[in-house]
Amino acid sequence: MLGYIWSFIIIFSLICSLFLGNTQNFSNSFTDSAADAIELLLTLAGVICLWSGLMKIAERSGFTRVIAKLLSPLLKRLFPRLDKNSAAFEAISMNISANLLGLGNTATPPGLKAMRELHRLNGEGDRASDEMVTFVVMNTASLQLMPTTLGMLRAGYGSAAPFEILVPVWISSACALTVALVLAKAGNRLTGRAKWS
């Protein structure tokens, strides 16, 4: 679907530039945007590789289990049917830790692992369990204490104080997460899903 949207935007821009006689600006912006995209990709690739490597070291060293224990009081309330020693619980902890640091792309591998484990425990086929819904909501509207990726983007585009946005990020992400969790829990209660055995 996204491919169709982007194709429409490009074709519409081309048609407008032809009708307005502004094809030179269109072609210049097209090539400049491609160069900017590659530059941004290389900038983010370094950050993603660094944090992905650190997360892998944390997993192999057992640090992930320490994080899971620290987050277990909160996560146990959000995922009451989930065993705190399970692989799903540990993956959820790592995903949330990466999201707290604003490392959205680094949070993806543990997020996928957590969803696979939750699906395995689900036993309801393709129907999502309460835990799966709650996890997706938490992952989508994540609380960010240190928006590292956003700070790197702002620094890359010349911001003199790339992390001056901390307080607005804390407020907006906390509000989004609170509303999302309340709606997810209310929805889970309304649907009356079956409990794990």
Image (spheres, rainbow, N blue to C red):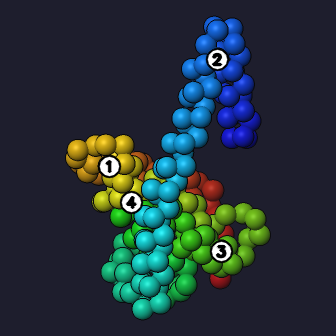
Of labels 3 and 1, the one closer to you: 1
| Mark 2 / mark 4, whichever is N-terminal | 2
Measure the alpha-carbon separation of dots 2 and 4: 39 Å
Q: Is tag 4's residue or tag 3's residue first in the polypeptide sequence? A: 4
Q: Residue 167, how many percent across, how many down?
A: 23, 48
Locate residue 42, reporting x and y percent: 50, 57
Distance (Cα) linking label 3 and label 1: 36 Å
- Give the image quarter of residue 94: bottom left
State which quarter of the image contains the C terminus: bottom right
Label 1, label 4: how many angstroms apart (C-alpha)? Answer: 15 Å
The answer to the question of whether label 2 and label 1 lie on touching residues, with beta carbons closer than 8 A, is no
Task: Look at discs 2 and 3 and give the one toward the viewer.
Answer: 2
In primary-sequence order, the first of circles 1 and 4 is 4
Q: Secondary structure at mark 1?
A: helix
Q: Secondary structure at mark 2?
A: helix
Number of residues whose C-alpha sits closer than 10 Å to that of mark 4, classed few (under 14), some (14–19) or many (20 or more): many
Q: Which mark is residue 23?
A: 2
Residue 102 tag number: 4
Residue at coordinates 43% horizontally, 64% vertically from top-left?
A: 47
Q: CA distance from mark 2 to mark 1?
A: 32 Å
Q: Position of residue 3 (x, y in %)?
A: 72, 40
Report x, y in % for residue 124. 73, 71
Q: Mark 3 or mark 2, which is nearer the start of the sequence?
A: 2
Mark 2–mark 3 distance (CA, rounded to whole Å): 49 Å
* Disc nearer the start of the sequence (3/1): 3
Say which residue appears at 58% left-offset and 40% top-offset: 34
Q: Secondary structure at mark 3?
A: helix
| Residue at numbered disc 3 | 116
Q: Residue 155 — which label?
A: 1
At label 3, the amino acid type is Arg
Q: Which mark is residue 12?
A: none
Q: Quadrant of residue 78?
A: bottom left
